[in-house]
Image (cartoon, helix red, strand yellow):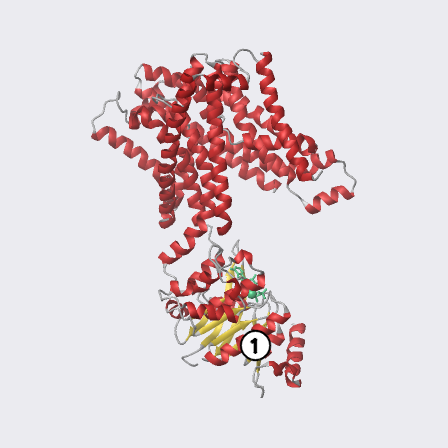
C-alpha cells in the first residue's frame, strides 16, 4: 500500500435506517488509486459510487475497513484545502454570482483571490459571458460547469467528480471531456470520476472500476493503456470501441 | 432511578426557562423584601388560588365558555365560505381578493368598533372571536380544497363522480388538516381575545376581574389571573397541537 | 377577455360591493347610529381641524411605538434565535418558552408589564413582543434551513465553523427572516395599538378607546380604518421587500 494516493482497504459502509434496520451500501471494497492516476467508477444506480466519493471526501465514515488519502485521514487533506469536489448536485450558492461562487474556495482557504485564474477557468468551461450571472439564471448544464470550475480553482491534489457532466448535451460534454483530459495531463491531479457514460470513462480514465449493487462491491477492473493520447482521435479507434462494448455488456448484465 | 434520570433530563431540557422564570420571580420578591401588595411570591399566589377556588372558578368558566362558541362559529363560517368559493368561480373572484387583503387587518384592534356597534355585551365578545378564527379557517381550508391531487381526482372523474361527490369523498377529508391548523392557530388566542374584550368593555369574566382587582390594588389576584390564563392558554395550545398531530397524519 | 383580466375585474367588483354595502348600511342607518357612512365619516373627521390634527398626532405616536417595538423586537428575536443556534442545548427550552410566551394572552400580563415599564412603555413593549416572536421563529428555523449539499461543500472545502455560520447559515436564513418580517411588521402595529389600551398618553389605540367611550362614532370609524391601513401597509411593504430581496436567496 502506497503512502500517496487514495487507498481503501476492505471498506464497508452500512447505513442505519429507522426502526433499527440497516442497509449495507458497500461491502469489502478494496481499491487503490495511485498518486496522479485518473480512475473512473462505473456501476448501476444505487451501487454506492457517490458513497465511495463521500467517504474519500471525509463526509462519511466507513463502518469497517481502512481508508487513507496520502497515508492519512481524509480530513487532513480537507483542512489543508487540497481537495476539489464537484458533486452530483451542483451545490452552488444561490446568492452569489458565478464568479463569486468560483472564488469561494479561496476565501474559505483564507487565500488571496486569484481573479485571473478564475476568469481563465470560466473561459475554459465556457461561462466567461456569465461570470456575473446568478445560478438561477443558468441552465442545469451551465451550473454543473461552474461547479467543476469551482472544484479546480485551488489546483487540488485530489479531485473527486460525481457525474459532473450528467446534465450536458453530447457536444458540450465532448468538449468538456477534452478540456478535462487536457487539464489532467498538465496537472496530473489524482482524480476519481463517477459516471454513467462508458465512453466518457474509457476516454478519460487510465483505469475503470465497475461496481455491482446490493451490496455495492467491485465487480471488474480494467486498466486502459491506449497507444494514442487522449485527444479527438481516440474515440474512433477500434480498440476504444472494443473496450466500451465489453464494459457496456458487463453493466447490462449486472 | 435509572429511569427517572432521563425523564428528569427531558423535563429540564424543555422546561428550564419556566423554572428560571419562577426562580427569578421569587428572587426579585425576596431580595427586595416586597410585600404581597407590591409583588407576591409564587407560593403565596398558589396558596391564595387554592384557598379561593370559587373566586376564580366562575370567571374562568365564563371566559372559556365565551371562547368556544365564537371559535366554532368562525371556523364554520370560514369553511362554508371556502366551499362556496371553491364551487363558484364568480364568487371566488368576488370574495377571495378582498378577503386575502383583509386578512392582514388586526381583528382584535377592531374591538372598540365592534363594541360600539354590537353593544357592551357578550355578543361583541363572540363576534370578535368569530372574526379572529374566520380568516385562518377560510384561507387554510380553501388552500387544501384547491391543492391539486392529480391521480385521485382523475380516478373520481373517470368514475363520473359529480363535483359534490368529489367534494364530499375526496376534497373535504383532504381539507381536514387545514381546518385543524386553523383551530391550532386561533383557539389559544381566543381566550386572550375574550379577556381583552371583557377588560375593555367591563363585561364579567376574568377580564373584568383584572379591572376590579387593579382598582382594589389586589395584586395577588392580578398575579393569580396572569398564572391561570397562562396555564389555560397553554393547555388549549397543547390540546389543539396534539389534536392536529394525531388526526392530521390520517388525512395527509 | 383574458382570465387574468376577468379575475382582476371580479376582484375590484367584490371590493367595490363591500365598500358600497358599508356606505349603504351607514346612509340608511340599517345598523343603527354606531355605523356611520364611511364617506361621511372620513370627510367630517378630516374636515374638522381639531379631529384631523388629533388623528395625525395619534398616528405619529403609534408609528413611533410600532417602529421602535419592531426594531427592539426584531433585534431581540434574532439574537435569541441565534443563541439557540449557537448552543443547541438551549434550543428545546427556547422553543417552548417562545410558544408559551406567544400563547399567553397579553392582557393577562398587562398589569404586570405596566409595573415593569410604565404605561408609556407598554405599547413599545407589546409591539416588541409581537415582532420578537415572529423574528425568533424565523431565525431559529431559518438558520437550520441550510441545504445538505451546500453544507457538504463547505465541509470538503475545509471551512471553519465561523465561515460556515457567516457565509452559509446566515445567508441561508435570509428567506425565512424576510418571511418573519412580513409577520413582524403587522404584528408590531397590532401590538402597539393593543399596548396603548393600557393607559398610554396618546396613540391610535388611545383615540379609539376615547372615541368609543364618548360616542364619537365617526372618529372611531376613521381611527379604526387608519389602524387597519397602517397594518396593511406594514404587511405589504414587507411582502414587497421579501419579493425584491428574497429572490436572490431562494
Ligand atoms: N445517508 C444515507 N442513509 C441511508 N441510505 C443511504 C444514504 N446514502 C446512501 N444510501 C444508500 O446507499 C446506496 C448507495 O447510494 P449512492 O448514492 O452511493 O449510489 P450511487 O451509486 O451514487 O447511485 P447514482 O448513480 O444513482 O447516483 C443507495 O441504495 C442509497 O439508498
Ligand atoms: Mg450518485
Q: Quadrant of the N terminus of chain C?
A: top right
Relative to the observer, which residue lies in front, B225 or C133? C133
Residue A166 image-quadrant placement: bottom right
- State the image coordinates of residue A107 (x, y, percent, origin top left): 38, 63
Protein chain holding label 1: A
Relative to the observer, which residue lies in front, C100 or A129? A129
Disc 1 element: helix
User: In the image, A204: left or right of A73?
Assistant: right
Q: Which residue carries the number 1 mark? A: A178
User: In the image, A53: left or right of A200?
Assistant: left
Q: Residue at x 55, y 22 (%)?
A: B69
Residue C94 image-quadrant placement: top left
Q: For mark 1, does the 10 Å Cα neighbourhood hold few (<14), some (14 to 19), or many (20 or more) residues?
A: some
Relative to the observer, which residue lies in front, A113 or A41? A113
User: In the image, C200: left or right of A120?
Assistant: left
- State the image coordinates of residue C68 (x, y, percent, origin top left): 36, 34
Vertical placement of B112 versus B177: above or below? above
Q: Residue at x 40, y 17 (%)?
A: C50
- State the image coordinates of residue C8 (x, y, percent, origin top left): 64, 35
Badge count: 1
Q: Quadrant of ligand 1?
A: bottom right
Does the image show residue B228?
Answer: no
- State the image coordinates of residue B48 (x, y, percent, origin top left): 32, 21
Residue placed furthest toward the bottom:
A227
Does the image show residue B66?
Answer: yes
Q: Is mark 1 within 8 Å of ligand 1?
A: no
Residue B209 image-quadrant placement: top left
Amino acid at each position: 500500500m502506497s503512502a500517496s494516493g487514495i487507498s481503501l482497504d476492505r471498506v464497508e459502509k452500512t447505513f442505519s435506517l429507522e426502526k433499527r434496520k440497516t442497509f449495507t451500501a458497500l461491502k469489502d471494497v478494496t481499491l487503490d488509486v495511485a498518486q496522479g492516476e485518473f480512475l473512473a467508477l462505473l456501476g448501476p444506480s444505487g451501487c454506492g459510487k457517490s458513497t465511495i466519493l463521500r467517504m474519500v471526501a471525509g463526509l462519511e465514515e466507513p463502518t469497517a475497513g481502512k481508508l487513507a488519502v496520502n497515508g492519512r485521514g481524509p480530513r487532513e487533506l480537507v483542512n489543508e484545502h487540497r481537495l476539489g469536489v464537484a458533486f452530483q448536485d451542483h451545490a452552488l450558492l444561490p446568492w452569489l454570482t458565478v464568479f463569486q461562487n468560483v472564488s469561494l474556495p479561496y476565501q474559505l482557504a483564507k487565500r488571496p483571490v486569484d481573479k485571473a485564474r478564475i476568469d481563465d477557468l470560466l473561459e475554459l468551461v465556457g461561462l466567461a459571458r456569465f461570470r456575473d450571472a446568478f445560478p438561477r439564471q443558468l441552465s442545469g448544464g451551465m451550473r454543473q460547469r461552474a461547479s467543476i470550475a469551482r472544484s479546480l480553482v485551488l489546483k487540488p491534489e485530489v479531485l473527486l467528480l460525481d457525474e459532473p457532466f450528467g446534465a450536458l448535451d453530447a457536444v458540450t460534454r465532448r468538449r468538456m471531456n477534452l478540456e478535462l483530459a487536457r487539464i489532467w495531463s498538465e496537472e496530473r491531479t489524482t482524480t476519481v470520476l463517477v459516471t454513467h457514460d462508458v465512453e466518457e470513462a474509457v476516454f478519460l480514465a487510465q483505469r475503470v472500476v465497475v461496481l455491482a449493487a446490493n451490496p455495492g462491491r467491485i465487480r471488474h477492473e480494467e486498466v486502459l493503456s491506449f497507444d494514442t493520447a487522449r485527444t479527438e482521435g481516440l474515440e474512433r479507434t477500434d480498440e476504444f470501441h472494443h473496450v466500451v462494448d465489453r464494459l457496456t455488456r458487463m453493466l447490462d448484465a449486472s | 432511578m435509572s429511569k427517572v434520570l432521563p425523564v428528569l433530563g427531558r423535563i429540564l431540557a424543555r422546561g428550564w426557562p419556566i423554572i428560571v422564570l419562577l426562580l427569578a420571580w421569587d428572587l426579585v420578591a425576596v431580595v427586595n423584601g416586597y410585600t404581597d401588595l407590591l409583588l407576591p411570591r409564587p407560593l403565596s399566589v398558589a396558596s391564595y388560588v387554592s384557598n379561593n377556588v370559587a373566586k376564580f372558578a366562575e370567571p374562568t368558566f365564563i371566559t372559556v365558555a365565551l371562547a368556544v362558541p365564537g371559535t366554532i362559529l368562525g371556523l364554520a363560517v370560514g369553511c362554508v365560505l371556502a366551499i362556496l368559493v371553491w364551487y363558484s368561480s364568480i364568487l371566488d373572484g368576488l370574495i377571495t381578493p378582498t378577503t386575502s387583503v383583509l386578512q392582514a387587518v388586526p381583528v382584535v384592534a377592531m374591538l372598540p368598533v365592534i363594541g360600539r356597534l354590537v353593544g357592551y355585551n357578550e355578543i361583541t365578545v363572540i363576534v370578535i372571536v368569530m372574526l379572529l378564527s374566520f380568516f385562518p379557517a377560510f384561507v387554510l381550508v380553501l388552500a387544501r380544497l384547491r391543492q391539486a391531487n392529480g391521480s385521485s381526482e382523475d380516478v373520481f372523474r373517470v368514475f363520473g363522480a359529480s363535483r359534490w361527490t368529489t367534494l364530499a369523498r375526496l376534497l373535504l377529508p383532504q381539507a381536514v388538516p387545514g381546518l385543524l391548523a386553523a383551530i391550532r392557530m386561533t383557539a389559544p388566542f381566543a381566550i386572550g381575545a375574550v379577556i381583552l374584550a371583557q377588560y375593555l368593555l367591563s363585561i364579567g369574566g376574568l377580564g373584568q376581574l383584572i379591572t376590579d382587582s387593579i382598582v382594589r390594588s389586589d395584586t395577588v389576584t392580578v398575579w393569580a389571573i396572569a398564572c391561570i390564563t397562562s396555564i389555560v392558554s397553554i393547555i388549549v395550545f397543547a390540546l389543539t397541537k396534539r389534536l392536529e398531530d394525531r388526526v392530521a397524519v390520517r388525512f395527509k | 377577455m383574458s382570465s387574468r383580466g376577468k379575475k382582476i375585474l371580479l376582484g375590484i367588483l367584490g371590493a367595490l360591493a363591500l365598500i358600497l354595502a358599508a356606505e349603504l348600511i351607514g346612509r340608511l342607518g340599517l345598523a343603527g347610529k354606531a355605523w356611520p357612512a364611511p364617506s361621511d365619516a372620513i370627510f367630517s373627521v378630516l374636515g374638522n381641524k381639531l379631529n384631523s390634527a388629533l388623528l395625525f398626532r395619534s398616528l405619529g405616536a403609534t408609528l413611533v411605538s410600532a417602529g421602535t417595538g419592531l426594531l427592539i423586537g426584531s433585534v431581540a428575536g434574532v439574537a435569541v434565535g441565534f443563541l439557540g443556534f449557537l448552543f443547541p442545548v438551549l434550543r428545546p427550552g427556547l422553543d417552548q418558552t417562545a410558544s408559551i410566551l406567544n400563547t399567553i394572552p397579553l392582557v393577562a400580563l398587562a398589569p404586570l408589564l405596566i409595573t415593569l415599564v410604565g404605561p408609556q412603555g407598554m405599547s413599545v413593549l407589546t409591539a416588541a413582543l409581537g415582532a420578537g416572536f415572529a423574528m425568533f421563529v424565523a431565525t431559529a428555523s431559518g438558520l437550520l434551513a441550510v441545504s445538505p449539499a451546500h453544507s457538504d461543500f463547505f465541509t470538503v472545502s475545509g471551512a471553519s465553523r465561523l465561515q460556515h455560520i457567516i457565509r452559509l447559515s446566515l445567508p441561508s436564513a435570509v428567506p425565512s427572516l424576510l418571511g418573519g418580517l412580513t409577520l413582524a411588521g403587522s404584528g408590531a402595529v397590532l401590538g402597539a395599538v393593543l399596548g396603548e389600551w393600557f393607559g398610554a398618553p396618546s396613540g391610535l389605540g388611545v383615540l379609539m378607546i376615547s372615541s368609543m367611550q364618548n360616542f364619537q362614532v365617526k372618529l372611531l370609524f376613521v381611527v379604526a380604518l387608519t389602524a387597519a391601513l397602517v397594518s396593511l401597509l406594514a404587511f405589504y411593504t414587507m411582502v414587497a421587500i421579501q419579493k425584491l430581496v428574497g429572490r436572490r436567496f431562494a
